[in-house]
Image (tube, rainbow, N blue to C red):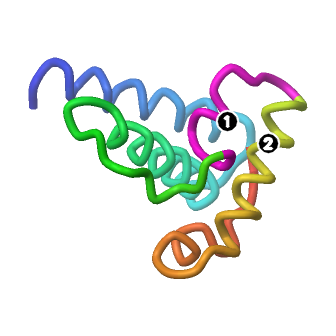
Amino acid sequence: MSTEANRIVQKLWGYCTVLRDDGLSYGDYLEQLSVLLFLKLAHEQTQPPWNQESPVPEGYDWSTLVGKDGVELETQYRRVLEHLGKQHGLLGLVFRKAQNKI
C-alpha cells in the first residue's frame, strides 16, 4: 500500500475510533462513513480531470455540508439524507433509510 493510501486508511480508522468512543456501534459508524464517502466521491468525480456530472442533485451534495458546523451541519445532513433517500434508482437505494447517528 502506498504511503498516501496508508495515510488515508489511518485517518479513516481514526474517525471510526472517535465515532465508536462516542457510543456508535460498528454498523452505525460504518453506515455514516459510507454515506459521507459516497457524497465525497460523487463530488470528486465532478472535479478535474474527470469533470463528470454529479449523480447527487445540487443542494444535497458534498458542497452543501462543507463549511457548516454544529446545528447547521446536523440540520443540512439530515436534509441531505432524507431528500436523497426519496430519489429514484440507485441513488435512492443507497440513501434509503439512512439516518444521522453521529
Quadrant of the rendered image containing residue 5: top left
The quarter of the rendered structure image containing the C terminus is: top right
Question: Which residue is nearer to you in this view: 102 or 94?
Answer: 94
Q: Which residues are magenta?
A: 59-70
| Label 1: element kind | helix
Q: Which mark is residue 64?
A: 1
Choose the circle earlier in sequence order: 1 or 2.
1
The quarter of the rendered structure image containing the N terminus is: top left
Question: Which residue is nearer to you in this view: 89 or 22?
Answer: 89
Q: Magenta part mainly helix, strand or loop? A: loop
The correct choice, above or below, for 39 with respect to 7 in the image is below
Q: Which mark is residue 76?
A: 2
- Judged from this view, the residue extending furthest toward the left is 1
Question: Tag 1: Cα neighbours inside 10 Å, few (<14), some, or many (≥20)?
Answer: some
* In magenta segment, residue 63: yes
The type of residue carrying mark 1 is Thr
Question: Which residue is nearer to you in this view: 16 or 84?
Answer: 84
Q: At 82% from the left edge and 39% from the top edge, which residue is drawn?
A: 74
